[in-house]
Amino acid sequence: MNMSEEESSFYVAIEDPKLFRRELLGSSKMMIGLLQRYEAIKKIREEKIKSMFKFNEVAQEIVILINRLNKTIPQTKLRNLYEKSQGIVEKRKDNKQQVKEEKLVHPEITQLQKELFAIEEKLSKLK
């Protein structure tokens, strides 16, 4: 082997070394920026996982507290009236369920509505 063949296999001529160095440094700078963004995303993901675990713990605690509250609240007619106002599930002969909406009418509310209607009539007469 010739010395020139041996040297040519190891050395590559760079036409503009300043431009090459500038582009190499620019690429290095871009890679560092990408790595910094990756680390920021990694940190955000960790915070998200921590927040999700904390949310689940708080949600479980809320469920426990609601159950305790429901046990301590005395049973009243209002709760039954509320359930009726939400709807009643009826079963048909063909085993399909149908939700029947019932509007619950309280005697106090009807009385107040009558009084309100009477007041509105008097106001309309005065105008």
Image (cartoon, rainbow, N blue to C red):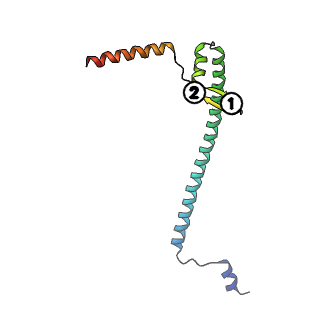
Which numbered mark, 1 or 2, is in the foreground of this view?
1
Q: For the residue marked with disc 1, what is the amino acid?
A: Arg
Q: Secondary structure at mark 1?
A: loop
Q: Tag 2: Cα neighbours inside 10 Å, few (<14), some, or many (≥20)?
A: few
- The residue at 59%/54% (across/down) is 35
Horizontal side, residue 73 vs residue 113: left or right = right
Q: Residue at x 61, y 17 (%)?
A: 80
Q: Position of residue 81 (x, y in %)?
A: 58, 18
Residue identified by numbered label 1: 92
Secondary element under disc 2, as helix, strand or loop, is loop
Kindly give the residue lying farthest to the left in the view shown. Answer: 127
Determine which residue is flagged by label 2: 101
Q: Quadrant of the N terminus?
A: bottom right
- The kind of residue on which mark 2 rests is Glu
Q: Residue at x 60, y 49 (%)?
A: 39
Residue extending farthest front: 93
How far apart marks 1 and 2 lie (CA) works out to 15 Å
